[in-house]
Image: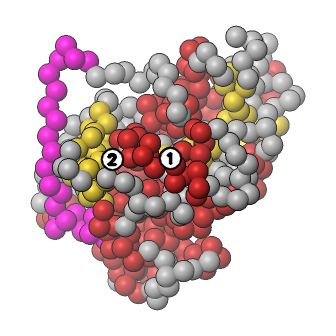
Amino acid sequence: SNNRPVSRVAVLGATGSIGVATLDVIENLNRCDPELAWEVSSVSGHSQIESLIQLADGCQTAPHSVVVSNAENEPQAAQALKTAAAQPDSRLTERCLLDVGPDALVRAATAKDVDVVVAAIVGRAGLESTLAAVHAGKRVALANKETLVVAGPVVTQAAADNGAELLPIDSEHSAIFQCLAESRARQSHSTMLASSPNSTPGSAASDQAQSLNSSATPSWPGVRRLILTASGGPFRDWTTAQMREATIDQALAHPTWKMGAKITIDSASMMNKALEVIEAKWLFNVPADKIEVVVHPQSLIHSLVEFEDGSLIAQVSPPDMRMPIQYALTYPRRLPCPAPALDRSQSWDMTLCPADPERFPALALGFEVARVGGTAGAVVNAANETAVDLFLKRQIRFTDIPEICRRTLLDHNHESSPTLQRLLKLDVWARDRARELAQI
Ligand code: NAD
Ligand code: MG
């Protein structure tokens, strides 16, 4: 197995919840993939420098680069890397380069020998590196949903133009991607015709993945609705009055998933589902009215597709992000995964119930943003990132989060076909506006 071709992976946001799970998946693939050897070409982290170096040191082959995106942490990182590399059993050699600052993320994402970029940075901060990977024609395993929310049309167009594959890590979107297999097969003929002029004819697999979000792709044959499941978060059964008094600890206590702080707060407000509706719109190239949300507290059904005849296809597995992460890496292949399968010696309840947009106003906002598109995604995302940050600093109430998002959105002049530059300017404006609104 020494002769296996190598697949090289840049893990951006390696110190986060998705990043750490990705490194575990890669380590396991190296044991059980008969076709490919997997190498981590770079890891990035913004802070948590010690754990970043430890993660780099834990890779079977030392990464080519360790990226510290927050340049202020360079001295600490240089010292930690030196100390780690000096250990007798360390695999970190002088070949492992320390690269710092936001541009270093772009260098890691576009390095020639990189095959797959795992975009696992949280928030708008992941946009430039994700987009750079798309422009470089990489396979992008996308956890960083905010990039699609902010700049969906720009990113999907760039993917089509550069033959980049945009594969979802978000569990709901991975589930839908899997449930669409039949429709995708029916579509494959038109896909070949739709593949972009400057993309070299790839394998059938890569042509199929491109069809996922190519703007030239016709709608999915036979598909009626994409149905995203939502756990409902820790406040699923709370009244609005109770949510008004919610503490940080209560909002961070997610019942089924262990994730980074920002997405955990988003799950409690159901803004996460709102972002996912927008993500689904761009990723699968479907209008907002073809997307639905249902509440499913057990997080076993990761999403469903409804077909024209009323048949539902669901993807089911215990909640463990290593499953969708691995699928995005190995697609279209299926291999043993460190995430456990559903234990059938036990009973499992799988409840589905309607979502309540009255108690979770973020949801309606998400559908509205997905419907109008244009500048709305960038504005709502920036307002939300700001509001979540303010909530975590105890400066606003939990229920202020969706209200600040709604009002920031109302205050902006909507444009339907903004440039990337315009979107990034609006991102800055919306953060300021959200902060002002928080003070009123
Ligand atoms: P996390 O907070 O655990 O990790 C975030 C990572 O981003 C860390 O490596 C951090 O160092 C890095 N980072 C933070 N700020 C940065 C900046 N300004 N510049 C560069 N890097 C920065 O977050 P997470 O839970 O792993 O989520 C990452 C992304 O994946 C988010 O977009 C989230 O919505 C998405 N996602 C996560 C899960 C999950 O289970 N955790 C599931 C679905 C989608
Ligand atoms: Mg999700």
- 54 vs 269, nearest the viewer: 269
Residue visible at 17% across and 17% down? Answer: 346
Relative horizontal placement of residue 189, taking residue 275 as reference (left or right): right
Cα–Cα span, label 2 and label 1? 43 Å
The amino acid sitting under disc 2 is: Leu
Q: Is mark 1 on a helix, strand or loop?
A: helix
Is residue 361 found inside the magenta-colored segment of the image? yes
- Residue identifier under label 1: 188
- 274 vs 98, nearest the viewer: 274
The label nearer to you, 2 versus 1, is: 1
Q: Residue furthest right?
A: 94
The magenta segment: 343-365
The amino acid sitting under disc 1 is: Ser
- Residue identifier under label 2: 252
- Residue 374: horizontal and vertical position, in percent? 48, 77
Q: Is tag 2's residue or tag 1's residue first in the polypeptide sequence?
A: 1
Is residue 335 found inside the magenta-colored segment of the image? no
Whether label 2 touches label 1, CB < 8 Å: no
Q: Is the magenta stretch mostly helix, strand or loop?
A: loop
> Would you say residue 370 is visible in this rendering?
yes
Residue visible at 44% across and 74% down? Answer: 373
- Residue 195: horizontal and vertical position, in percent? 62, 55
Residue visible at 64% across and 51% down? Answer: 164
Relative horizontal placement of residue 75, taking residue 220 as reference (left or right): right
Specify the quadrant that holds the C terminus.
Answer: bottom left
Residue visible at 62% across and 58% down? Answer: 160
Q: For residue 44, which quarter of the picture?
A: top right
Q: For residue 344, which quarter of the picture?
A: top left
